[in-house]
Image (spheres, rainbow, N blue to C red):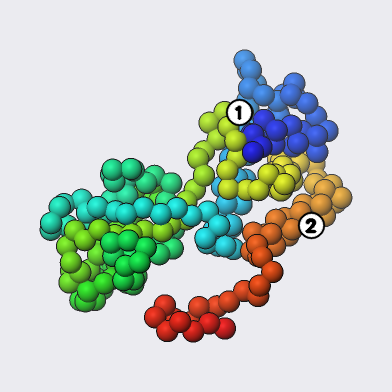
């Protein structure tokens, strides 16, 4: 996996500068490390688009326990026995395990009258809570398949998750809007074209990882596909 340091080195090559640059250099006394948060912002942006392009690409599973045994309808992700703090979006919600009956998402204000087998999510990603409908069996174990955010980049040695290594240059190219910081310079057209082409290649790779035509699911229970 590529590291933040490798991506920053690529950005500087495109910018035609080095680590001693007052604006784009590494952090030392009196020098800001502008590229550090920039790389994180670009990674977050690309991963967010990956979740929309292919929701199952970055996914995990876990069985949830209710906050209150026997009577609870709330399942706080951050307080599970294995805390879930990287939640991005739900992909599949079932009773008990991966073979259990499917629960259906409903709006929060409808849960009270929705009947059995419905759920809603509330809260920000880092502290999301799954709530089941009033008529759903309380404290029933819930199987959750979810899209996740890769770990933040804490240092230059941190590896970049969620983006294939062969497309790591897309992060550096995506970051080149820094050419326009302060309105003092323009993004070279050659690099702009390179960015467009590589970005398109990344998402084509993410979207289709095999040779079969993509299928559209019409209904969970019907088993009908186009």
User: Residue at the top extreme?
Assistant: 29
Query: Residue 84 appears at what percent x and percent y?
Result: 37, 46
Could you say which disc has been placed on residue 157 in the image? 1
Residue sitting farthest toward the right? 190
Task: Decide: is 195 above or below 154.
Answer: below
Q: Is residue 196 above or below residue 133?
A: above
Of the residues tagged 2 and 1, which is closer to the observer? Answer: 1
Q: Quadrant of the N terminus?
A: top right
Q: Residue at x 12, y 58 (%)?
A: 71
User: In front: 13, or 207?
Assistant: 207
| Residue plotted at (80% across, 38% down) | 14
Between 223 and 50, the one lying in front of the other is 223
Drawn side of residue 80 relative to residue 85, left or right: left
Residue 207 location (% of width, % of height):
64, 64
Q: What's the residue at 70%, 25% (across, down)?
A: 25
Q: Earlier in the sequence, mark 2 or mark 1?
A: 1
**Where is 50 relative to 191, above or below?**
below
Callout 1 environment at 10 Å: few (<14), some (14 to 19), or many (20+)?
Answer: few
Q: Secondary structure at mark 1?
A: loop
Residue wearing tag 2: 197
Count residues near mark 2 (Cα–Cα under 10 Å), then give few for <14, some for 14-19, many for 20+.
few
* Res. 99 image quadrant: bottom left
| Figure quadrant of residue 203 | bottom right
């Amino acid at each position: 996996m590529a590291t933040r340091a490798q991506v920053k080195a690529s950005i500087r090559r495109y910018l035609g500068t080095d680590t001693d640059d007052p604006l784009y250099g590494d952090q030392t006394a009196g020098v800001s490390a502008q590229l550090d948060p920039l790389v994180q912002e670009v990674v977050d942006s690309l991963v967010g688009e990956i979740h929309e392009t292919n929701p199952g690409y970055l996914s995990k599973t876990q069985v949830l326990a209710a906050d209150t045994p026997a009577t609870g309808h709330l399942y706080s992700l951050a307080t599970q026995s294995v805390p879930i703090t990287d939640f991005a979006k739900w992909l599949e919600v079932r009773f008990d395990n991966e073979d259990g009956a499917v629960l259906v998402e409903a709006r929060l204000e409808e849960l009270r009258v929705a009947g059995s087998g419905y759920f809603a999510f509330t809260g920000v990603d880092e502290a999301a809570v799954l709530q089941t409908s009033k008529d759903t069996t309380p404290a029933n174990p819930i199987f959750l398949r979810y899209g996740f955010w890769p770990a933040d980049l804490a240092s230059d040695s941190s590896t970049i998750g969620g983006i294939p290594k062969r497309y790591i240059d897309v992060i550096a190219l995506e970051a080149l809007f820094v050419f326009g910081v302060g309105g003092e310079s323009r993004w070279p057209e050659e690099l702009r074209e390179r960015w467009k082409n590589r970005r398109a290649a990344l998402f084509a790779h993410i979207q289709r990882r095999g040779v079969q035509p993509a299928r559209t699911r019409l209904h969970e229970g019907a088993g009908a596909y186009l």
